[in-house]
Image (tube, grey):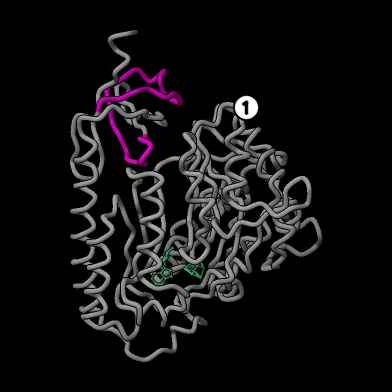
Amino acid sequence: MNVYDSRKMADVLAPMGYKQIEEPDGADMIILNTCHIREKATDKVFSELGRLKKHKDQGEKEDRKVLMAVAGCVAQAEGDFIAERAPYVDMVFGPQTYGELPEMVAQATGAYGKDRVINTNFDEEDKFDKLPEETTEQGPTAFVAVQEGCDKFCTFCVVPYTRGGEYSRSVKAVYNEILKLADQDVREVSLLGQNVNAYHGLDENGNTASLADLILKVADINGIERIRYTTSHPRDMQQDLIDVHAHHKVMPYLHLPVQSGSNKILKAMNRKHTRDLYFDIIERFRKVRPDIAISGDFIVGFPGETEQDFEDTMDLVRHINYSSAYSFKYSQRPGTPAATMGGLVREEVKDERLQRLQALLADQMRQFNEQTVGLDLPVLFDGNPRPDQLHGRTPYNQAVHVQGNPRLNGHFENVRITGTNGKSLTGELILAEAA
Ligand code: 5AD
Ligand code: SF4
């Protein structure tokens, strides 16, 4: 979501003459887009700010004003604290305010007599209306936010507080944005939302559309060949979304976080579902797409997690067989209900559990990748790390490297998968014979 938001900030600023550059050196404005989800991410903000300040100081020496900004969820949650602790920061603004950037920049440059911006306004509905449809997107894949915020209130999570309540964009707004992307040669879209399968936007007739309805509408767009979506919640998983995976444009990949395999911990997390519901959902997906790649998120060391609870998570993982996954040590977040729960798990225990879980998940990832060796798969090329090498993704979202001409970048080609290092694949272009 932050990658998408950063692109949108660049889009809003483009008409003012700003252009995104790769390095902060020589920039007129530096925006640090931040994440508040875990303590580590938040800690990084101040060390990064200290590092980036050098560019502002350098600018001052050269008599050049460099605006410094902190955006994103840390700005939303800790705006005043940042302003106080980092007085050199000119703008602090939350995720709902990016459409107001032109006014904020004007203010920060002194246009209204004052020159500092602290903006943590919270108007979910308005956010997308103020963002331009035009985009600076380059490359064959793009993120598109369709839903933002969350009403689930998992007890460990800051999202409902930093991103606000659930809000869905209209079908038309999403459709129009993707039409433009298709015009710019985007071939794959990932529909984004903190709780994307809770999507309930209005369609042209004023009816509520589900994520499956939206996906089918997007699938009508010429040029868009692949559709993905992330991240889903088990409680919002409806059969129509499962069924939509029969469509050839919907990729055989599902990211469905479960967090824990213990019913007791799921309850304490306020996940509002059991491990059995999770098994049932995965089974129903596999009925429609037996080859579907399953990915997930896990938290180890939630307050009260015993060795047995953790074993339940390991057991769930063994039953599901993940193709990839993200796993984290529980991180106490201020203001969340879990932050005041007893039964804290010691750091060494968290470390040890995370290691065991990650070893199992890495093993499953290797196995999944090995299963695809020998197959011919369509790959969308999205970059060339070396002049004679292409990078792309399979339908299962595996990274593949092949030898090939960079002109194939942005195109689909069939690739024979020849090997894996466990994490990514190597392959050979099949077209070579024909070309
Ligand atoms: N501690 C650890 N991991 C967390 N996540 C969210 N909040 C926390 C937290 N307080 C993880 C969850 C979620 C992912 C985006 O980040 O696994 O699915
Ligand atoms: Fe956070 Fe996801 Fe739970 Fe919402 S559903 S509170 S975003 S973990």
Q: In the rendered image of this protein, does residue 275 appear above or below residue 104? A: below
The single residue placed furthest to the right in the displayed view is: 112
- Find residue 171 and report its horizontal and vertical position in percent: 69, 46
Point out residue 392 in the picture as x, y percentages from the top left corner: 36, 32
Where does residue 271 sit, x and y in percent of width and height? 45, 74
Q: Nearer the viewer, residue 341 or 229?
A: 229
Q: Which residue is mark 1?
A: 183
Q: Position of 173 compared to 193: left or right?
A: right
Q: How many marks?
A: 1
- Give coordinates of residue 76: x percent, y percent: 60, 68
Q: Within 10 Å of the Cα at label 1, are there few (<14), some (14-19), or many (20+) other Cα atoms?
A: few
Report if residue 126 lies within the magenta region: no
409 inside magenta stretch? yes
Residue at x-position 21% and y-position 79%: 349
Residue at point 24%, 45% (across, down): 368
Q: Quadrant of the C terminus?
A: top left
Closer to us: 374 or 109: 374
The foreground one among 243 and 219 is 243
Q: What amino acid type is highlighted by mark number 1?
A: Asp
Q: In which quarter of the view is residue 193 placed?
A: bottom right
Can residue 343 be seen from the camera position used here? Answer: yes
Instruction: Look at the image and tell me whether residue 139 can be seen.
Output: no
The structure residue drawn at horizontal position 70% and vertical position 58%, both measured from the top left corner, is: 108
Looking at the rendering, the stretch of residues picked out in magenta corresponds to: 393-416
Instruction: Please determine whether, in this image, residue 330 is positioned above or below residue 100.
Output: below
Q: Is residue 354 above or below residue 341?
A: above
Q: In what element is the residue under mark 1?
A: helix
